[in-house]
Amino acid sequence: MTSHRWTGWTLAAALAAGASAATAQERVTVITPYLAQPGTQFYLDGFRAEAEARGWQVNVVDTAGDIAAVVSRLEDAATQGVDAIVINVDPAQVEAGLIEAQAAGIPVIGMDAGAHPLLATNVTSNGYAMAAETAAYVVNRLNGSGRVVMFVFDPFPPVQQRGVIADAIFANHPDIEVIDRVTPDVQDGGIADSRARMEAILAANPEPGSIDAVWAAWDQPALGALQAIEDAGRADEGIVITGIDANPQAREAIAAGGPFEASVAQDFEGIGRAVADATARLLAGEDLREKVIFVPARLVTQANAAE
C-alpha cells in the first residue's frame, strides 16, 4: 500500500520556488466550511495581515458548512498549482483532497484543523487545556455537585477534544450529573439552534435548581443557552454558563456579571499569524518537525473580560 505521509519539499522544488518568487506572487488558498464562525474570521484577519506583508496572493474559499465540498475545492487548488493550501476543517474528512494536493507537491497547513499525516503541521490552541480550565471552573463553582448540560461538536477534532476532557472531568466527580449532551446545528454559527435546544431542555426541567450549569465547547452555544435562560426568566437561578473562545459578544456577556461567567481566550489572530509563519517556512523549503504548533490561551472571567 502506498503511504501518503507528507515528507516536505525536495531541494529541487524549494530551489524552483525560490527562483519563481522573484517574478510572481506566491499563491495561497485557504479553504473552510466555517467562515460563519467568529473564530474563523479572526484567524483569517491574522493570516491575511501576515500574508499581505509577505506579498502573497490569498484566495479564501468558503463552502458554507459543506464539508464534502472542501474535497472538490482542494482538488481545484491542486489543479491550479497554488504554492500552499490552508484548511480549517477535519483533515480526516477531506483526505481525498489532501492526497491530490500531495500528488501535486503542494504543502497543506491546518489552521485549527486537527493533526493528520498529510498535513505539514496544524496550528491551534491546546483544546485539552482549555476544556480542563472551563470544566474545572464549573465543578468548583458547583462545589462538586450539580446537574450540567453540555454543548459539544464531535465532527470537528479541535472541538471534539474539548468534549472528551470535559466528559472526563465531570465523570471524575460522582455528584456531577450530565443531564444532556447536545450537538447543535452550526450552519448559522450555532447560536440560534443552541437557543432552541436549550429552550427545550429548560421546558423539560422547569423547577428552579433542576439545572445548575451549562458547559459549552465554544461560545456560540453558550450565548444561545444564555438567551434561552434569560428569556425563560431563569437568569436569577444561579445557572453557571461557560464557553471557549472569548469572542467579543461572550466577553460582553461575562463582563455584565450574569449567568455567563467564564470562557477561554484563544489568540485567534495569533493562530492566523502562526499559520502564515509556518507557511512561509514551508515555502522557503523547510521540513517542519512540529506536527502540531500550540498558541497560548487564557481564562476570561468578569475580572478580566474588559481587557
Image (spheres, rainbow, N blue to C red):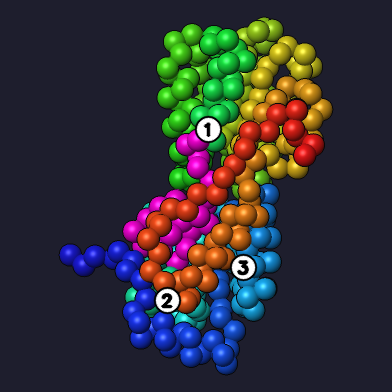
Marks 1 and 3: which is nearer the front? 1
Report the number of discs.
Answer: 3
Task: Please state which amino acid type lies under the numbered disc 2.
Answer: Gly
| Residue linked to disc 1 | 131
Give the CA separation, mark 1 to mark 3: 29 Å
Marks 2 and 3: which is nearer the front? 2
Q: Earlier in the sequence, mark 2 or mark 3?
A: 3
Q: Would you identify the image quadrant in which residue 214 lies?
A: top right
Q: Are marks 2 and 1 in contact (CB under 8 Å)?
A: no
Q: In the rendered view of the protein, which quadrant contains the N terminus?
A: bottom left
Q: Earlier in the sequence, mark 1 or mark 3?
A: 3
Residue 30 shows up from this direction:
yes
Residue that appears at 37% across and 61% down: 289
Residue 287 position in % (x across, y down): 38, 69
On screen, residue 67 versus residue 15, left or right, reads: right
The kind of secondary structure element at disc 1 is helix
Residue 63 position in % (x across, y down): 57, 61
Residue that appears at 41% across and 82% down: 14
Q: Which residues are magenta?
A: 108-129
Task: Please state which amino acid type lies under the numbered disc 3.
Answer: Val
Residue that appears at 51% across and 90% down: 20
Looking at the image, residue 167 lies above or below residue 236: below
Mark 2, residues whose alpha carbon is within 10 Å: few (<14), some, or many (≥20)?
Answer: many
Looking at the image, residue 223 lies above or below residue 78: above
Mark 1, residues whose alpha carbon is within 10 Å: few (<14), some, or many (≥20)?
Answer: many
Q: Is residue 127 magenta?
A: yes
| Residue linked to disc 2 | 285
The kind of secondary structure element at disc 3 is strand
Residue that appears at 37% across and 76% down: 9
| Residue linked to disc 3 | 60
On screen, residue 32 versus residue 192, left or right, reads: left
